[in-house]
């Protein structure tokens, strides 16, 4: 199997650059990507299950992997949600599929966002993970605009092995994430 382009870049360019920048003695000390989780929350799925099925199909097209249905943990009367009802779907990507998805996200999808000013560099948690949201699934070229029932957003979380926010920021910046100026 062919290695993903972003994985090649990580091994040949980013690992030496990170090792030099943070004075790592061993290449295994360099932070790396662990997983990417894409989550779609659909409150409308309670009234009509077609929205959930359409979102699952779109997520499968975007990621190349079947999604898992997420269910409500507890009942919320104000939103007419019962415990165990289907309220969204998610996909966890690892290894080659993760690098392929990130490559398409960085090179193709993010540049298609209207009025894009860069991703916020403040969305890192203390563990070195980065989370951001997209407003619509139509920025991915795999999604056919004519077949979309309803536009919806998605949350993307990139989990890294970095120990600090600075290491994680530098790793994602070198991978090509378009961050806005701080």
Image (cartoon, rainbow, N blue to C red):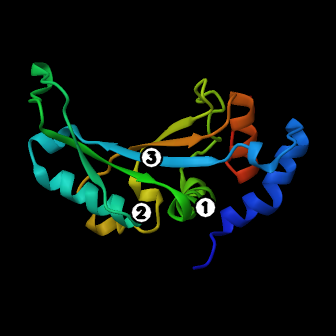
Nearer-N-terminus badge (1/3): 3
Q: Quadrant of the image for the N terminus?
A: bottom right
Q: Residue at the location (37% across, 44% down)?
A: 39
Nearer-N-terminus badge (1/2): 2
Q: Identify the element where label 3 is drawn.
A: strand
* Residue pointed to by mark 1: 103
Residue 77: image x %, image y %?
Answer: 9, 20
Nearer-N-terminus badge (3/2): 3
**Residue 180, can we see it?**
no
Mark 2 burial class by Cα count in 10 Å: few <14, some 14-19, many 20+: some
Quadrant in which residue 166 is drawn: top right
Residues under labels 3 and 2: Cα distance? 13 Å
Q: Residue at the location (8% across, 30% down)?
A: 82
Residues under labels 1 and 2: Cα distance? 12 Å
Residues under labels 1 and 3: Cα distance? 15 Å
Front-most of 106 and 12? 12
Left/right placement of residue 147 relative to residue 1 reads: left
Front-most of 49 and 38? 38
Left/right placement of residue 95 relative to residue 107 reads: left
* Residue pointed to by mark 2: 62
Residue 139: image x %, image y %?
Answer: 47, 57
């Amino acid at each position: 199997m062919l290695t993903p382009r972003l994985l090649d870049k990580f091994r040949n360019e980013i690992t030496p650059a990170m090792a030099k920048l943070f004075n790592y003695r061993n290449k295994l000390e360099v932070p790396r990507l662990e997983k990417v989780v894409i989550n779609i929350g659909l409150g409308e799925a309670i009234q009509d299950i077609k929205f959930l099925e359409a979102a699952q199909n779109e997520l499968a097209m975007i990621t190349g992997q079947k999604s898992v249905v997420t269910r409500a943990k507890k009942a919320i009367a104000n939103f007419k949600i019962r415990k165990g009802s289907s309220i969204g779907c998610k996909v966890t990507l690892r290894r080659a599929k993760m690098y392929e998805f990130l490559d398409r996200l960085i090179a193709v999808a993010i540049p298609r966002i209207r009025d894009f000013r860069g991703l916020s560099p403040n969305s890192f948690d203390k563990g070195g993970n980065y989370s951001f949201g997209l407003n619509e699934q139509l920025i991915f070229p795999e999604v056919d605009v004519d077949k979309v029932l309803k536009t919806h957003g998605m949350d993307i979380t990139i989990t890294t092995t970095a120990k600090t926010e600075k290491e994680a920021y530098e790793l994602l910046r070198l991978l090509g994430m378009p961050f806005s100026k701080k």
